[in-house]
Image (cartoon, rainbow, N blue to C red):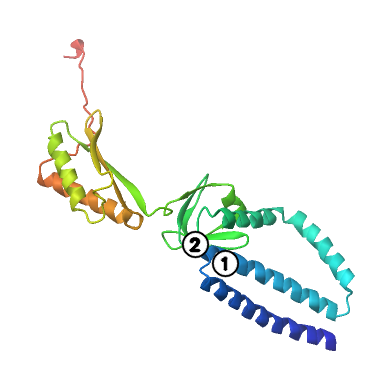
Amino acid sequence: CIKVVLSIIVFFVGRRIISWIVNIMRKSLERANIDAGVVQFISSAGKAVLYMLLIFNIAISLGVKESSVAALLGTAGVTVGLALQGGLANLAGGVLLLIFKPFVVGDYIIQDQTNGCEGTVAKIEICYTTLLSIDNKNVVIPNGTLSNSIITNVTARDQRKLEIKVGISYQSDMHKVKEILERLLKEDPDTKEDEGMVVFVDSLGDSSVIMGFRVWVPTDSYWPARWRLNERIKEEFDANGIEIPFNQLDVHVYQKENER
């Protein structure tokens, strides 16, 4: 009974020591400017290993022989490995994600597959990666699934190419529209005028001429710039009498001779 009580005390004291060691390890890695995902992964793995050592030592203190504990752990490892093949795949996937780094903590990614998810990477742990969606939801994805998916890293580059297309009526002045679009791009604070800014006629549609432009913008400003330019285009087109056509349906009624 005394050994059992002491083992329980050792377990709770060991938990505090493990938390202390993990915190020191995390802070040391952060001071070394190691990637946040690697810090989270190593901390989770270190915590798991320390708990295994704690339980191993408690078992020995209760009188269990080292060979018996080792055999038990080996048998349990094989059994758990067979039962948790998906978990081991997630563990291997986490290692691959940290080695090849298709994304890091803070990146916005899109998982391109059926029922795919997207969001900002919040945590990369041993078996799971947590994304923070636009509407502030936690999306937890197994690392094995991520490592076998096509991942689009939206924020991997400092700049993104912004493309907007808009239709105008055939009666509108096409050259005037190009002048308006060029002026809006030059006036916008986020566009890069000296890096491939282009205004073009994209196509001649059934009921409209499709105008468009492409310009580089900072990745962080992509959506604000897109929304702002769409609003400015509508305002300038209205002010200059440029018509944006909408779908129309012409109905022709024919009457037979004997019904007249």
Where's the N terminus, which quadrant? bottom right
For mark 2, does the 10 Å Cα neighbourhood hold few (<14), some (14 to 19), or many (20 or more) residues?
some
Residue at screen point 66% across, 70% down: 46
Q: Position of residue 99 (x, y in %)?
A: 59, 55
Give the answer, above or below, for where 102 lies relative to 55.
above
Q: Position of residue 58 (x, y in %)?
A: 80, 79
Query: Of 243 and 212, which appears nearest the observer?
Result: 212
Where's the C terminus, which quadrant? top left
Query: Of 197 and 77, which appears nearest the observer?
Result: 197
- Judge left or right: residue 137 versus residue 93: left
> Can residue 148 be seen by looking at this rendering?
yes
Q: CA distance from mark 1 to mark 2?
A: 10 Å
Task: Point out which mark residue 40 bears.
Answer: 1
For mark 1, does the 10 Å Cα neighbourhood hold few (<14), some (14 to 19), or many (20 or more) residues?
some
Tag 1: residue type?
Answer: Gln
Task: Tell me, yes or no, whether the two marked residues, 1 and 2, touch with CB atoms within 8 Å.
Answer: yes
Residue at screen point 14% across, 41% down: 179
Residue lying farthest to the top in this orientation: 258
Give the answer, above or below, for where 229 lies relative to 28.
above
Tag 2: residue type?
Answer: Val
Instruction: Tally the marks.
Output: 2
* Label 1 element class: helix
Give the answer, above or below, for where 27 lies relative to 213.
below
Q: Which residue is mark 2?
A: 105
- Judge left or right: residue 140 versus residue 15: left
* Label 2 element class: loop
Q: Earlier in the sequence, mark 1 or mark 2?
A: 1
Q: Position of residue 117 (x, y in %)?
A: 49, 52
